[in-house]
Amino acid sequence: MMLVYKGGQEVGKGTYWNIANGSRIDAGGSELLPGGKGTAYLRVAPGMMLLAGPVLGLLYFVALPIITIGMVAQLTVKKVWSVLTGLVGNIAYFEWRPTESYLSGDKKNRKKAKKS
């Protein structure tokens, strides 16, 4: 008994699960699986499908607090980082602005030239 089947292969009665997109095929008799040779299906027993639900629910229940703590930590670090870079930006002031260009010279030089 094989566990992995390919698309286009003739299979018997059973439940087949597409690994790539998660779709389920219920074969009532001798049928061809949809897709090409690159599409892989797992044959899953009905009892295993029933057990998969609670197991995945338990995994979600255990992982949710860990994910929440990680997201709160990430948001905190981002907020602290933005406050620190804002403080440094206010303390350290640079005259050079990369988005501006003074092709005719600096503003101070132009003012002096007009006064003369």
Image: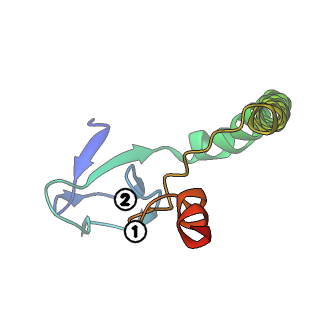
Residue furthest front in the image: 116
The residue indicated by pointer 1 is: 28
| In the displayed structure image, the side of residue 44 where residue 32 appears, left or right | left
The residue closer to the viewer here, 20 or 51, is 20
| Residue at (44% x, 60% y) in the render | 105
Label 1 secondary element: loop
**Residue drawn at x 38%, y 46% as measured from the top left:** 43
Q: Is residue 12 above or below residue 71?
A: below
Q: Which residue is mark 2?
A: 13
- Marks 2/1: CA–CA distance: 5 Å
Q: Position of residue 111 (x, y in %)?
A: 61, 66
Residue 80 quadrant: top right
Query: Looking at the figure, which quarter contains the N terminus?
Result: top left
Please rate how many residues cluster around mark 2, counting C-alpha atoms within 10 Å: few if below 14, some from 14 to 19, many from 20. Answer: few
**In the rendering, which numbered label is found on residue 69?**
none
Given contact means CB atoms under 8 Å apart, are the residues at marks 2 and 1 in contact?
Answer: yes
x, y percent for residue 67? 77, 33
User: Considering depth in this image, is 46 or 81 the residue closer to the camera?
Assistant: 81
Q: Where is residue 107, by image quadrant?
A: bottom right
Disc 1 residue type (three-letter):
Gly
